Amino acid sequence: MNLSALLWRNWNLRSRLLLIILLPVIYMFCSMVWYTYHSRLEEGKGELAERAYVVSTALAESVEYNLLTRNLAGLKSTMTDVMLSDRSIYRIDVLDADRTHVLHVISSEKALSTERFVEVPVRRQLVWVNLLNDAQNVRADGLALDAGKADGKNAAKNASVLGYVRVTMTATRMLARHSQRFMFELAISALALFVSAVLAVYLSLSLTHPLQMAIETLREIREGDYSSTLEVTTGGEIGDLQTSINAMSVSLQQAKQDLENKVQERTQDLMASRNEALKANAEKRKLIQKVHSIVEDERKSIAIEIHDELNASLIAARLEAQRIQHLAAQIETSEVNGEAAGEIQERAKAITKMTLDLYANGRNLVRRLRPEVLDMLGLQGAVEDMLRHYNSNAQGCQFHFDSEGDFSGLDSGLAISVYRIIQEALSNVMKHAQATQVEVALTMLEAQHSLQIEVSDNGQGFDIHHSSAGIGITGMRERVAAFHGEIDLQSSAEEGTQLIIRFPVATT
């Protein structure tokens, strides 16, 4: 696509109409001016050539005698009279038969000469009269001729060329005269062009103004003002367009009103559903928090019962076994039934070992149900103890802990939730990450009144956008939501995982 097509595409309708109307008119105007100019020029040249020929012919007939008699004064007077009678003559030259310059006259007026001239020969046309009986003839040029020459010879002399008259015309006056005519015709053509341009502008305005008004109305409708209407000012296709725009405006206004009513109704329904969902969600959060609290209380109760009842029973069984072992030792010393005493002693040792194992398992169970270290050492000490346990049992993975701030004033429910979240995060690392380095940071942000947990590893990671959340992550999200916290989980394949959680902390 060429440049003109691109420019035409970007033009508005008025410019296109003006171009369509004025381009043929301007072309016709330029063609007419060019044709008139060249026709006038050619006409003037032809007129000059014709006049030069007439003048030179007349001069050739009138200067024959003066040229023959060498009457230069009379010759110059004749040439001057002819030049004064016609101001288009620039120069007159008289040449002899050998084309030797005899005399010339140049116009005294300031004019431009042409390079072309007309040259006419001056022929001998005099009839000789025998004036004397002595057969002497008088020659007009002062020379005596023999009267006895033959008539054919005299005829040849009469037809011989005496010289030449050369007339050079000037185009100044001709150009001035024709310029006046050309300027008059040019003025008429320019007036016609101006009238055509005014008419073209008027017609384009009469066509584009209604279209511009229609475009403005459509622009207002596009911006949302469907009440805009357009006055029908003309007929034909433009009138139909104006009527259609008005009808479309009314239809859009009605459709907008209907849509607004539907949107309002739907919005009310959605707001009601949202309020119900928020209410249900809040109730669910409260329920989850209460369930967590009940579970932790139940774990604490079970831990207490295990610690108080089971451990006490195990301690009593161990003491009884030790007593049996002591008595068996006394029987063995008395050498009474030594074989039975040895068996009793072995079984007592087995009972003692079993009670010790049960006691250790009970303490582990108590620690899992309710970490007593959390009550004794606080949140920071409990997390350190947890990481120390992982470092002693995990093979090929190092756990690092960093803490900042005072955690002694934390709510017990929030502290146990933080402990459980870190416990679940480390459990996920051990199960899925295959990491060699794990960083755990616990920070109290005093300026922001929040507690921040950060757990990061250098494991294999996962795609959080295409992987479904497991039960552990879902549980962590629920615990965070129960205390109005924020959770940010970032991970990608082969780049590890980073978990950042923030809990708001009330100031005391």
Image (cartoon, rainbow, N blue to C red):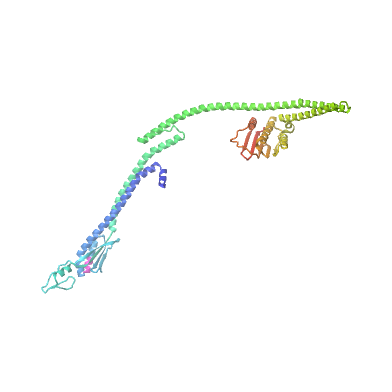
- 129, 482: nearer the viewer: 482
Query: In the rendered image of this protein, does residue 163 appear above or below residue 202?
Result: below
Tell me where residue 249 sits by quadrant: top left
Q: Could you tell me residue 89's position as x and y percent?
A: 26, 61
- 89, 377: nearer the viewer: 377
- 361, 278: nearer the viewer: 361
Q: Could you tell me residue 355's position as x and y percent?
A: 78, 28
For the C terminus, the image quarter is top right
Residue located farthest toward the left when viewing the structure as drawn: 133
Residue 450 shows in this picture? no
Residue located farthest toward the right when viewing the structure as drawn: 334
Tell me where residue 451 sits by quadrant: top right
Query: In the rendered image of this protein, does residue 126 appear above or below residue 188?
Result: below
Residue 13 shows in this picture? yes
Q: What is the chief secondary structure element of the magenta stretch?
A: helix
Query: In the rendered image of this protein, does residue 489 appear above or below residue 23?
Result: above
Residue range of the region highlighted in magenta in the rendering: 71-77
Tell me where residue 315 sits by quadrant: top right
Q: Could you tell me residue 337's position as x and y percent?
A: 86, 26
Q: Is residue 2 magenta?
A: no
Residue for point 21% across, 62% down: 57
Q: Could you tell me residue 278's position as x and y percent?
A: 59, 28
* Left or right placement of residue 182 versus residue 436 in this view: left
